[in-house]
Image: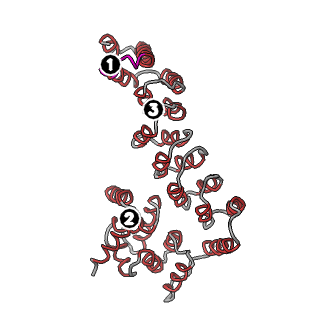
Amino acid sequence: MARLSQLAADPQTARRGDIYLAVATLYQSQAIRLSERERRLMREILLRLSSDVEMAIRISLAERLAEDDQAPSELILLLADDRIEVARPILLRSRILTDEDLLTLLDHLGEEHLVACAERSHIGERVCASLAQNQSQSVLVALVRNATAQINPQTFETLIEKSKEIAALQGPLAHRADLPASLALRMCDWVSDTLRAHIRLSYPQISAAAEQKLDAATRFVQSPAPSVTPGGSKLVDKLAGAGQLKAGFLLRVLHQGQLDLFDIAFARLLGLEPEQVSQILHRSGVVPLALACRGVGIDRCVFSTVYSLSRQAIGAAPMLTVAEITQADTAFESFTKAEALGRVRALAGTLS
């Protein structure tokens, strides 16, 4: 072991490759017999050498160990955290990696690594839930296209909401056999006619009444948002009574610059007065707006759009600073919808 440590410092790259493979092979075959000190020393040697060893050598080792169900978990984790060319076979195929290992890796892996994790066979519910929080379209699409991924209803709901803004998710979601019917029907509010027809054929349990509701929802979403008038409250009441007052409507009227109608609809969803909502949304900083969005079900991935459009409408700076982005992320991640809603209402109660 001491001799191997000395050899690891040799500047000759070719020799380092030989040492790397020798140590990895020894680790692979003798892991059970090694002491903790010896195992730690071997990991340190491999880690120190990995940046200087040819990519082809590391890839070859990863391909070999990806199929080895007896490989030391420490060696597998070391390769999984290497460059994507090395990590891919491990992330995709190694049965040594547990869901706990993957959850730990997800915290710091790059996009290409996350795509490989999303494509991995039979990933568990917690891993799927973590991946679904990612903002990368490539990661989300890879997850949804993975037919063996164990996606629970709550994670499907997250993905469905993101599909409003990420059209590439809509097709793969609509074609999943395990997509809950209630969520499939919700997608009919914004997907193409072709996907809507597919959903209806795939869920024959849809009643005639539900068909009529879907048709009404489709016409509503495709029509221009009405201009705000003194009857704006009546319109919001009517939509709420029909179950059509949703985050999608808020985004549509905001995109069309109808800030008054946006405030009225947002207030209805939050259970507040429009004046209170206007104060919270436009004059109280990024955190109240983030909490309000979280409380009514607006996804984090479209929060920046809501912030920008709402600020532009009142002539304020539309760009989030780095600190504000961090604050918004914390607000979305730290509170459930119910908790966020409670905090917004509590804040509204302090306004004069």
Q: Quick one: which residue is furthest to the top in this view?
A: 3
How packed mark 1 is, by other alpha carbons closer than 10 Å (few <14, some 14-19, many 20 or more), is few
* Of callouts 2 and 3, the N-terminal one: 3
* Of callouts 2 and 1, the N-terminal one: 1
Q: Mark 2, mark 1: which one is toward the viewer?
A: 1
Is most of the magenta stretch helix, strand or loop?
Answer: helix
Return the residue at label 3.
Answer: 80
From the viewer's perspective, is residue 57 above or below residue 235? above
- Whether residue 320 is visible to the viewer of this picture, yes or no, is no
User: Marks 2 and 3, Cα distance to the nearest angstrom?
Assistant: 35 Å
Label 2 residue SS: helix
Please name the amino acid that badge 3 sits on.
Answer: Ala
From the viewer's perspective, is residue 193 above or below residue 159? below
How packed mark 2 is, by other alpha carbons closer than 10 Å (few <14, some 14-19, many 20 or more), is many
User: Marks 1 and 3, Cα distance to the nearest angstrom?
Assistant: 23 Å
Return the residue at label 1.
Answer: 35
Image position of 333 (left or right of 302): left
User: Marks 2 and 1, Cα distance to the nearest angstrom?
Assistant: 51 Å
Residue 27 placement (x, y as % from top left) = 41, 18
Label 3 residue SS: helix
Segment tinted magenta in the rendering: 30-39
How packed mark 3 is, by other alpha carbons closer than 10 Å (few <14, some 14-19, many 20 or more), is many
The quadrant where residue 197 appears? bottom right
Residue at image location 40% in from the left, 24% down from the top: 50
Please name the amino acid that badge 2 sits on.
Answer: Ala
Residue 10 placement (x, y as % from top left) = 34, 14
Label 1 residue SS: loop
Return the residue at label 2.
Answer: 290
